[in-house]
Amino acid sequence: MTKEELVAKIAKEAKVTKVQAHKSLNCVFDGVTSALKKGKRVSFVGFGTFSVSKRKARTGRNPQTGEPLRIAAAKVPRFKAGKRLKDAVR
C-alpha cells in the first residue's frame, strides 16, 4: 500500500477530503519523526512501537574490491509490532 492509497482509504472511511486526510497523515508522520529525533519512543497500543537504537561502528568490506572500510556508528529507527498487529498478520 502506498501513501496515496492510504490517504484515499482515510478520506473514504473518515468521510473527509483527500487534502484533509493527507494533512492528517503528514501530521502523524511528522509527530513520530519529531519524537524519534528527540530520542523518545512512540507507542500505538496494539499496533506497535517506534524507537531509536544505536548501531556501533564496525568494519565492512567493499563488495567490488574486497577492501576493508570503516562504517561509522549511527542511530537508526526501529519498529516492534504489537500483539494485535502480529495476530492480524498471522
Image (spheres, rainbow, N blue to C red):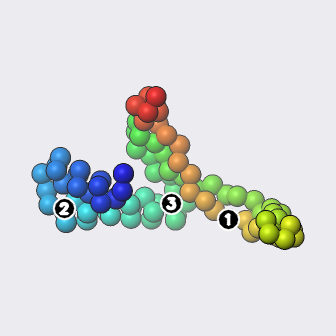
* Neighbour tally class for label 3: few under 14, some 14-19, many 20 plus, Cα within 10 Å: some
Query: Looking at the image, which residue is at 19% across and 61% down?
Result: 18
Query: Looking at the image, which residue is at 16% across and 50% down?
Result: 12
Kindly identify which residue carries mark 1: 74
* Neighbour tally class for label 2: few under 14, some 14-19, many 20 plus, Cα within 10 Å: some
Which of discs 2 and 1 lies nearer the camera? The answer is 2
Q: Which of 38 and 57 is in front in this view?
A: 57
Q: Residue 74: name its quadrant.
A: bottom right
Query: Looking at the image, which residue is at 80% across and 69% down?
Result: 64
Q: What residue type is labelled 1?
A: Ala
Q: What residue type is labelled 2?
A: Lys
Which of discs 3 and 1 lies nearer the camera? The answer is 1
Badge 3 marks a residue whose secondary structure is helix
Which of discs 3 and 2 lies nearer the camera? The answer is 2
Farthest residue, direction front:
64
Left or right of 70? Residue 12 is: left
Cα separation, mark 3 vs mark 1, equals 14 Å
The answer to whether residue 24 of the structure is visible from this angle is: no
Is residue 30 shown above or below 1? below
Q: Which of 72 and 1 is in front in this view?
A: 1
Cα separation, mark 3 vs mark 2, equals 27 Å
Query: Looking at the image, which residue is at 52% across and 64% down?
Result: 38
Q: Determine contact: label 2, label 1, CB under 8 Å.
A: no
Q: Where is residue 67 in the image (x, y as percent from the top left)?
A: 87, 70
* Neighbour tally class for label 1: few under 14, some 14-19, many 20 plus, Cα within 10 Å: few
Kindly identify which residue carries mark 3: 36
The answer to whether residue 22 of the structure is visible from this angle is: yes
Kindly identify which residue carries mark 2: 18
Q: Where is residue 21 in the image (x, y as percent from the top left)?
A: 22, 59
